[in-house]
Amino acid sequence: MRIGLLTVALCLLSSLTLSQEIESLLKSKGCYSCHDLEKSKVGPPFKVIAKEYKNNPDAMKTLVQSLMSGSVGKWQGLANKYGITITSFYMPRQPVSKEEAEKISKWILSLED
Ligand code: HEC
């Protein structure tokens, strides 16, 4: 019982640290000037991106690629599907390393609503 509780506490603590680490990474890279967790901005909300790629086996690869090389025209059509309004049709290449891109993509894909 005690060990169970301790495990739960440790898990909560480590997921908290991860989201805080990601949060400051996203802030320092300027992602929030175009994205929000839940609301439409210049680009799609992170939670909607998570929904779109949920059952896509290539999700990690695709998102890492989009972050490192940019993404054009994918979300114009998807915006309607999710009832969101984005104000740009492309995202420029982002100043992230491959490790950062992977960490961020993994975090986005773990989001649920
Ligand atoms: C200048 C505005 C801007 C900035 C800065 C920006 N994005 Fe985007 N992002 C967009 C737009 C617009 C789209 C939709 C692109 C499309 O339609 O192909 C997008 C799409 C995405 C996608 C989905 C890509 C796909 O393949 O479907 C992810 C993931 C993403 N952004 C994450 C980020 C992260 C993380 C950062 C910070 C490192 C960031 N964005 C910074 C505007 C931005």
Image: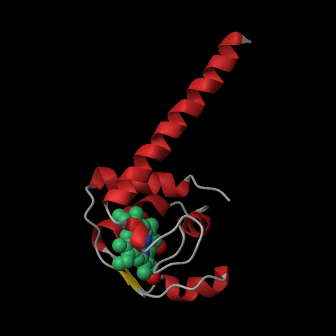
Viewer-closest of 60 and 12 = 12
Question: Is 89 left, or right, of 44 in this rendering?
Answer: left
Q: Position of residue 5 (x, y in %)?
A: 68, 19
Q: How many marks?
A: 0
Asked if residue 90 lies left or right of residue 87, the reply is: left
- Res 1 → quadrant: top right
Q: Is residue 77 above or below residue 17?
A: below
Q: Residue at x 53, y 39 (%)?
A: 16
Q: Could you tell me which residue is drawn at 25 percent across and 64 percent down?
A: 95
Position of the C terminus by quadrant: bottom right
Q: Is residue 44 above or below residue 95?
A: below
Q: Is residue 58 visible?
A: no
67 relative position to 6: left or right: left
Q: Position of residue 30 (x, y in %)?
A: 34, 66
The picture quadrant for ligand 1 comes to: bottom left
Residue 24: image x %, image y %?
Answer: 38, 51
Q: Is residue 113 visible?
A: yes
Coloration mode: secondary structure
**In which quadrant of the rendered view does residue 34 lie?**
bottom left
Outermost right residue: 1
Q: Residue at x 30, y 78 (%)?
A: 92
Tell me if 5 is positioned left or right of 21 in this view.
Answer: right
Q: Residue at x 49, y 46 (%)?
A: 19
**Residue 10 image point, x, y percent:** 56, 25
Q: Quadrant of residue 45?
A: bottom right
Q: Where 13 sits versus 107, above or below?
A: above
